[in-house]
Image (cartoon, rainbow, N blue to C red):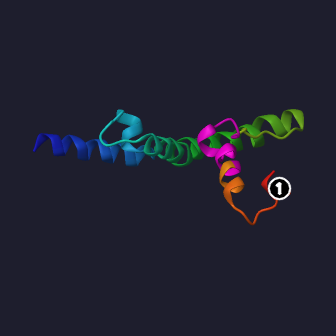
Amino acid sequence: NTKEVKMDVKENLAAIWGFPVGIIFNSQESRTENNIREDKKNALRNGVFPFLSELEEIYHNEIVKPEFGLSFAWDYDCYDELNPDVLKEMESMAKVPFVSINEQR
């Protein structure tokens, strides 16, 4: 079946690059908002960050440290997919009866 072969090719390419199939080929088959968020998180962790880590090491060891005596590192805090949802945590903590008000903050 041609459709199955195309899907196999897509899955193999995605695996090589370290990305989920839905991210690379914009597949919308049975995808919820939570699945998309998880796919983005996995794409960052498995596809983008390993490359950035290698690049960071080269920049740090060969350019920034020897030339300027400084450290170089990427800031990953800007990725919402990797940051916990603080509001959700606060709401769930507020519902727990045995947690004090100070602990909820």
Q: With 102 as the anchor, is 81 left or right in this view?
A: left
Q: What residue appears at the point 49 percent right and 47 percent down from the top-left corner?
A: 38
Q: Is residue 48 magenta?
A: no
- Mark 1 residue type: Ile
The residue at the far left in this view is: 1
Question: Where does label 1 land, which residue?
Answer: 101
Say above or below: 52 vs 92.
Answer: above
Place residue 26 in its image quadrant: top left
Q: Residues within 10 Å of mark 1 (few under 14, many from 20)?
A: few
Tell me which segment is drawn in magenta. 76-90
Position of residue 62 in the picture relative to residue 35 (left or right): right
Looking at the figure, which quarter contains the N terminus? top left
Please name the residue shown 64% across and 47% down the image.
88
Identify the residue at the far bottom of this view: 98
- For the residue pair 72 and 48, the one nearer the viewer reads as 48
Q: Could you say where residue 48 lies in the image, as x and y percent from the top left? A: 55, 41
Q: How many marks?
A: 1
Q: Residue at x 41, y 45 (%)?
A: 20
Residue 79 is a magenta residue? yes
Give how far across and how far down residue 8 sits, in percent: 24, 47
Outermost residue to the right: 69
Q: Position of residue 99 (x, y in %)?
A: 77, 63
Q: Secondary structure at mark 1?
A: helix
Query: Residue 28 sits in which quadrant?
Result: top left
